[in-house]
Image (cartoon, grey):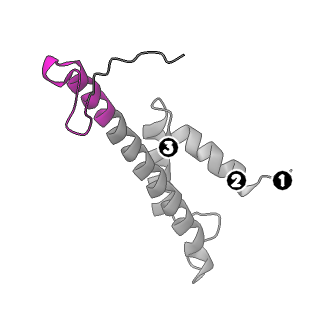
Amino acid sequence: MRISIQALYSLYRSIIRNPKYRGWVILGTLVYLLSPLDISPDVIPILGQVDDVLLLTIFFSEGYQMLVDYTRSLMGQSAEKKADTPEYQGSSPSQTVVDVEAETVE
């Protein structure tokens, strides 16, 4: 049975993005990093730290991406709230509304 690195990454990513299991994945990641029992033992000079560094890289990149997504969703909500207020309806500082009466040409 072959398990690809991409499949493991996708599985980790999908589980950490699920709010129901996020806490367990973070706890499991920290326990794995602090535990002396690894896929490659930490007593081996360079190879022992490779799996820890890879896991930390994936962990922080996914955490950062979730933070960016959350910030974008907050920014989107605040922009929607601004657009709903009467003072911002019709135009914004970056847009100019031009009212043109158009006629068809035959």
Residue at 59% of width from left, 75% of height from top?
48
| Side of 72 relative to 61 (left or right) | left
- Alpha-carbon span between mark 2 and mark 3: 18 Å
* Label 2 element class: helix
Q: Residue furthest right?
A: 1
Q: Position of residue 4 (x, y in %)?
A: 76, 54
Which mark is first along the chain, 3 or 2?
2
Q: Which residue is mark 2?
A: 6
Which mark is first along the chain, 1 or 3?
1
* Kind of residue sitting beneath label 3: Val
| Side of 2 relative to 25 (left or right) | right
Q: Position of residue 95 (x, y in %)?
A: 27, 35
Q: Which mark is residue 25?
A: 3
Q: Position of residue 38 (x, y in %)?
A: 60, 63
Residue at 64% of width from left, 69% of height from top?
40
| Prevailing secondary structure of the magenta residues | helix
* Kind of residue sitting beneath label 1: Arg
Q: Which residue is mark 1?
A: 2
